Image (tube, helix red, strand yellow):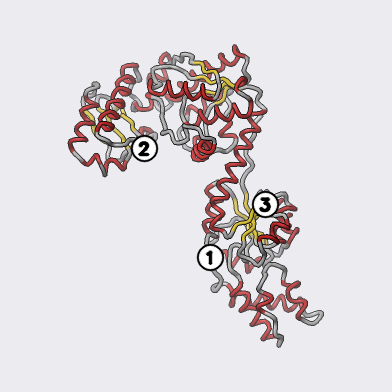
Amino acid sequence: MSASPVPLTVGFDLDMTLIDTVPGFRATLVALGAELGVELPVEEMTARLGPPLDLMLSPHLPDGTVGSAIERFRALYPDHSITTVPAFAGAHDAIAAVRRHGGQVVLVTGKFAPNAQRHVDHLALDVDLVAGEVWGVGKAQVLLERGATVYVGDHVHDVEGALAAGATSVSVLTGGCTREELLEAGTHVVLDDLTQFPAWLDEHVLDTRLAALAADLAGRESVVVAYSGGADSAFLLAAAVRALGADRVLAATGYSHSLPEAERDPARDFAASLGVRLVTPRTHEMEREGYVANSGDRCYFCKAELTEVLGELASREGFRHVATGTNADDAVAGFRPGIRAAAERGAITPLLDAGLTKAQVRAASRRWDLPTWDKPAAACLSSRVAYGIEVTPHRLGRIERAEAAVRRVLDEAGVGLRNLRVRDLGDRASVEVDAALLDGPLTAEWLRAAVRGAVLAEGFDQADLDPRGFRSGSLNDLLA
């Protein structure tokens, strides 16, 4: 069973939510009144924009004339309202926030659809659909058809539409309705304006995906977590404990030459802090020809070995599933043969299934006070060996010693270091550090020489600092 995330679709109202329609609406009403010979109460009519035109005009026009007046208003509107109406502060950023989460944007408005589209085009509002001439609960049909889970508006009738669609109602105070009126109507969230929407959406999406993760794990009965000690697998371990209890979760770290010694004790301490039993089975990827050959699919053989070992372990220990810490970013990051190997062997990917990205894993880890929330990425030692160069215990040990030596040199020089990779390119090492250090402390030639010397002392014939700095997966560039 999989708790796949609900796709994100956010609906927005237009008038007084995304755009400040008052100047254009006022000008159009004045022009309409002049043509009809009627003095319309323009200020009163524009104080709480939102209701349909027939409701706004009928109290001020003779019976039977409202329909033709509406047609004339719509004809006058483009000349008086499009270029003079601005987007509210935060409107474009609010839409961009939806896009960042991979979502769709639908515009659901009471406005005449062609005129709404003119605003969208003029202001370059990045929306997928413009649905016009819908009002109040009538908006629910469009929201339901498009699968919108959030609707943003400024009016109590926007709240009605959201609630009728079963969507989260988000209200902004840029229209004529007060906070109290909107809350009384049942809105879930009140924001001062759209500048506050991106931060709210980030939290809302994270909450939704964490709920999906918890539901998924709770239905799994028991899991063995493939636990490397990194941010993703540590978070998955903590989430599994929350959902299932520590007695139905087993942390398993595959011990081999490719796992840095420095990672082992912190991983053990973290598992202990959760009350989870940790096992450390030996993995034998070095006995797999494809792994040692180190072609572009090396990770396939590594993950195949790990998941087969953990699968046998889960069966012996009576656990139902093996879970990996693959996240949603990993699945779209391009070259990931290890994901395929794990999937072929039945491993589950709860973080991916819940739609959780790396940034969200870190945000949730920080929310839960996990010490791994800001832990730098720590790929296996074999990932430092250039493709086509045979992976051996000797090479891996040399890399690990060289990285430890570089850290000592920089620490003794008082230089803070977050990311470091010593890439084995044969007899030559390429040292990648945080790019900011290359323009800072490492402009000093004595310190650069000390870094190179530390690497050479561990058995490399040459060593150079990569001028581009640390880049996760940089050896993949060479596959091209």
Pick the front one: 477 or 157: 157
Q: Quadrant of the N terminus?
A: top right
Going by the numbered disc 2, the residue's amino acid type is: Arg
**Residue assigned mark 1:** 123
Q: Where is residue 439 in the image (x, y as percent from the top left)?
A: 26, 44
Discs 1, 2 touching: Cβ within 8 Å: no
Task: Give the residue displayed 31% in from the left and 24% down from the top.
Answer: 399
The kind of residue on which mark 1 rests is Leu
> Hey, which quadrant is residue 76 in on the image?
bottom right
> Circle 2 sits on which residue?
471
Q: How far apart are marks 3 and 1 (CA)?
A: 28 Å
Q: Do the residues labelled 3 and 1 touch (CB within 8 Å)?
A: no
Q: Where is residue 154 in the image (x, y as percent from the top left)?
A: 65, 62
What's the CA distance linking mark 3 and mark 2? Answer: 42 Å
- Which one is earlier in the sequence, the residue at label 1 or at label 2? 1
Answer above or below: position of 388 versus 71.
Answer: above
Can see residue 89? yes
**SS of the residue at dot 1?**
helix
Left or right of 444 in this view: 273: right
Tag 2's secondary structure?
loop
Q: Could you tell which of marks 3 and 2 lies nearer the N-terminus?
A: 3
- Tag count: 3
Asked if residue 112 shows in the view, the reply is no
> Neighbour class for label 3 at 10 Å: few (<14), some, many (≥20)?
some
Figure check: 353 above or below 319:
below
Q: Name the residue under label 3.
A: 188
Look at label 3 and name its amino acid.
His
Cα gap from disc 1 to disc 2, whole angstroms? 37 Å
Q: Which of marks 3 and 1 is in front?
A: 3
Callout 2: few (<14), some (14-19), or many (20+) C-alpha neighbours within 10 Å?
A: some
User: Measured along the vertical axis of the image, is residue 39 above or below residue 308?
Assistant: below
